[in-house]
Image: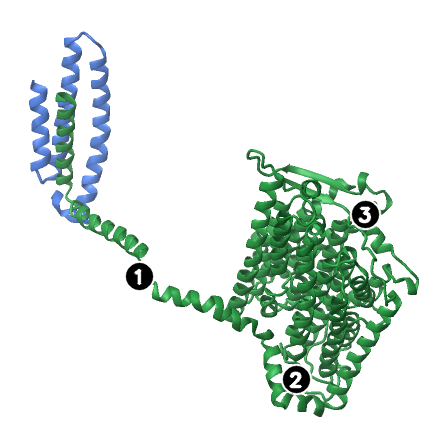
Amino acid sequence: MLAGILFALGVVGLLVRRNLVFVLMSVEIMLNAAGLAFVSAGARWAQADGQVMFIFILSMAASEVAVGLALVLQLYREKQSLDLDSVDEMKG
Amino acid sequence: MFKLLFLVPAIPFASFLWLATVGPRTSRRAVAIVGVGSIAACALLSLLLTGSYLVSPPLGGAYTQVLWTWIAAGGFTPQIGLYLDVLSLVMMLVVSFVSFVIHLYSAEFMLGEEGYSRFFAYMNLFVASMITLVLANNLLLLYLGWEGVGLCSYLLIGFWYQDSVNGAAAQKAFIVTRVGDTAFAIGLFLLFTHLGTLDIQELMRRASEQWSTGSSLAITAAALLLGGAVGKSAQLPLQTWLPDAMAGPTPTSALIHAATMVTAGVYLIARTHVLFSLAPPAQFAVAVVGAATLLLAGCSSLVQRDIKRILAYSTISQIGYMFLALGVGAWSAAIFHLMTHAFFKALLFLAAGVVIQALHHEHDIFKMGGLRRDLPYGFWGFVIGGSALAGLPLITAGFYSKDLILWHTWSSPQGSIALWIAGMIGVFLTSLYIYRLIFLVFYGDKKMEVSHRSHWRIKLPVVALCFLSIVGGFVNMPRALGNVTAFTDLLHASLPEALEANKAGMTEGLSEGLAAISFGCGLIAAYVLFLRRRSIANALGASSAGRAIHRFWFADWGMDWIYDRAFVRPVIWFSTIDRNDFIDAFYDGVAGLTELSWRALRATESGRVRWYAAWITAGTVIFVAIALWI
């Protein structure tokens, strides 16, 4: 239940925020919501797999943030802003 | 020794691959060494094979080397296999040796040209294809070689591709021969569906077992093969491509369009002679085509101005002789003439190359004259080659081979007096047009300065071919003159002997004597008309009838004009009025639909990352919902 609310919050944050840092934070919230769901499900059915998945998600999130923040820095140098809608060069 | 047979086509092919890939980045010297050296190895190997064949012939007079099975589909299993009997041995020897001599010549002749290695790559591919054609043990492999030489012919006619005239000539050659090749391919389908094999020897055996003489299937099959041969050998009515093919470099004309490729049709008919014996009407058609072609092309040759076009028409006319011999069942006489013709016609083209190069690529014989002293090699090449072509009695090769054909035309059961008379007129015409050329080019007043001295690589091939044009005929002499029959005896191992049924009113010696007289008349007429009394020739040409005939013959009896009206214009006309038919509408509709969907889908590609995320979310929600509730 809590995980579901957290995940929804993350999705909404991702969609409404224009600042790239906040978008990244929303992604983190979604990942953690999924992790929470795994852990609680693992506790509920007494399986160790849930915790294994969470550690996996944790390490993945760490590397994703590293790449994501590097991209944010690059984008800021390029555009002098963190507005997501400013990057629409790939428009068809 | 015979195990090395596969190397004869493999060496030039390997050299082609090297020249095509590495060649352009290496020096001209390396290109010449590889290009000529490979053919030299090929000729040497043929010579060795011939030697060991003569010393110890293989079992049954033929050696078959199967390399691998090409395709295996149901009952259809053509092999990559080589078949060496006397007929293919002679062809292989002639092809490889003439190729070697001409390659040596081209190493010097083409030295100043762009695309030196491209030229040698094409030439080596040609030799590989031609030898495949000659040695193939089944008709499908023969067809592969057949198309391979056609391709090389196309590439080499259009060698100077920057000039669009050459490209048009190359396309014409390719398309016109394609007409014949289509007939040939249909003939192959017919033979396979009815006899169940394409292996030549097996095919001939089954044909003679299953088909009776004169059966309609045999006639159809033979006629279709004849169609292929007519296209490749530039016989009536598909001869129009050969004169235009002279747009290619002169060594190409010598090798492909005189000595080897154009005689492939003769080889095909000789190879499948059993089939033609089963179909007397088709064989008679071969004789008629040959006789008609030799007369028509002889007349056309008489009025040309371009030195190479004269020789091209002469080639057509000489192949007409070979067809005539095939048509009357004198198979080995045809192959004999094929061999001597390869020597003297290659010689004439090489000598023409000497003249053309010395005169800054001038082709018009009326602008030449008095070159006798300045170009001794060109002059003697022309005199010896021309005399062999016209059949100067006793000392030239052409005399023996042509007289053998004429005698068989009279004496064989399929022969007739009409065909013999055609052959005799042909002898007169040949001698007239070739001495006209020689007198105009080498005698009279000097009109142009000679700029170029020949290298040994030019001289040596000319001398070698001069020698062969003289001694090439001594392997086979008529009864009245020594009765040497080494060549025909050899060939009878694979080709049946010509019958001598009708000897009434003529002996072999008399036929030869008349041919010699006919030759002499042509020589004297040429001497009078083109050297002593040019005014007579000019008066003849200036009269209105003379002018009309001149124009008519010059344009090859209007054949090009007829084809242009009958085939080319209707197609162009139809394609202009039929520009927008329903098939076009269909494809236009497809294109329009694609453009419409492109416009619609383009709108979704907004470049806004948050919209993409929203769409992904929405899609996920919908799919999860579908998965949960449905």
Q: Which residue is mark 3?
A: B493
Q: Decide which of B174, B299 is in the foreground and name it.
A: B299
The residue at the point 22 percent across, 49 percent down is B598
Q: Are marks 3 and 1 on the same chain?
A: yes
Residue B395 seen in the figure: no
Which chain does tag 1 point to?
A: B
Q: Decide which of A29, B503 is in the foreground and name it.
A: B503
* Label 3 environment density (alpha carbons within 10 Å; few <14, some 14–19, many ≥20): some
Q: Earlier in the sequence, mark 2 or mark 1?
A: 2
Residue B383 drawn at (x, y percent): 78, 75
* Amino acid residing under circle 2: Phe
Per the image, label 2 sits on a secondary structure element best described as: helix
Residue B536 drawn at (x, y percent): 71, 91
Q: Is residue B492 left or right of residue B142?
A: right
Q: Which residue is mark 2?
A: B366
Q: Earlier in the sequence, mark 3 or mark 1?
A: 3
